[in-house]
């Protein structure tokens, strides 16, 4: 690979992105696929991250949950998103994960025509289906973010700091804002 070539999209790279950057990447991918994507942050833990529209069709409300996660999404997580999205008037649902979905999710929601589950592998395939130039543009966007792998505080929306608990000798991410006590494990 020459210095001018971009690395290919790989699952471990996708899973290493900051959760906020993953949500923005999802919005960009849906936009490139022809949707009007609006980033939202509704509900506890931002249950709905994006709202999609196709052209001027305002009757079709598509709610999207973007979850950057290495392990499997549970059926309970999908049900929770689906319930919340229905409560706010969505009639179509997409759950995007950088990881996978439990087998129970796939069997339980297989017949739900308005619900689509997209795992990390399918998400990468979707980017590749956009064509090499667009997939490269998305990679340039991600690599252009100075701190693409450092998590963003879900409360304050500022980049977190890597900290070490001296007693337990374990690392974690901590918010750098004085009034916030938010922490996250280092993966």
Image (spheres, rainbow, N blue to C red):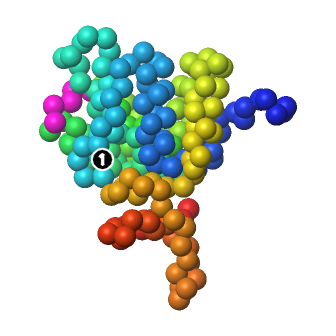
Residue drawn at point x = 44 percent, y = 66 percent? 176
Residue drawn at point x = 42 percent, y = 65 percent? 175
Dot 1 corresponds to which residue? 46
Residue drawn at point x = 48 percent, y = 61 percent? 160
Give the left or right position of residue 16, taking residue 103 as reference. Answer: right
Question: Quarter-wise, where is residue 2 in the image?
Answer: top right
Can the viewer see residue 86?
A: yes
Q: Is residue 91 magenta?
A: yes
Query: Quarter holding the C terminus?
Result: bottom right
Can the viewer see residue 125?
A: no
> Few, some or many C-alpha atoms within 10 Å of disc 1 (few <14, some 14-19, many ≥20)?
some
- Give the magenta-colored segment's residue range: 88-93
The majority secondary structure of the magenta stretch comes to loop
Q: Residue furthest bottom?
A: 167
Question: Quarter-wise, where is residue 117 in the image?
Answer: top left
Q: How many marks?
A: 1
Residue 151's x, y, as percent? 49, 55
Between 150 and 15, the one nearer to me in the picture = 150
Residue 39's x, y, as percent? 34, 34
Q: Secondary structure at mark 1?
A: helix
Give the left or right position of residue 24, taking residue 156 as reference. Answer: right
Residue 95's x, y, as percent? 37, 37
Give the left or right position of residue 100, taking residue 60 as reference. Answer: right
């Amino acid at each position: 690979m020459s210095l001018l070539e971009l690395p290919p999209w790989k699952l471990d790279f996708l899973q290493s992105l900051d959760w906020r950057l993953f949500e923005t990447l999802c919005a960009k991918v849906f936009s490139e696929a022809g949707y009007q994507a609006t980033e939202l942050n509704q509900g506890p833990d931002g249950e709905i991250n994006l709202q999609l529209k196709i052209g001027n069709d305002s009757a079709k409300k598509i709610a999207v949950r973007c979850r950057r996660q290495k392990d499997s999404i549970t059926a309970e997580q999908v049900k929770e998103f689906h319930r919340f999205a229905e409560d706010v008037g969505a009639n179509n649902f997409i759950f995007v994960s950088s990881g996978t979905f439990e087998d129970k999710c796939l069997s339980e929601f297989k017949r739900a025509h308005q619900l689509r589950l997209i795992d990390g592998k399918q998400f990468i395939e979707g980017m590749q289906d956009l064509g090499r130039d667009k997939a490269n543009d998305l990679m340039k966007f991600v690599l252009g973010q100075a701190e693409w792998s450092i998590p963003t505080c879900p409360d304050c929306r500022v980049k977190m700091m890597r900290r070490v608990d001296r007693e337990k000798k374990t690392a974690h991410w901590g918010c750098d804002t004085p009034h916030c006590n938010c922490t996250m494990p280092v993966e």
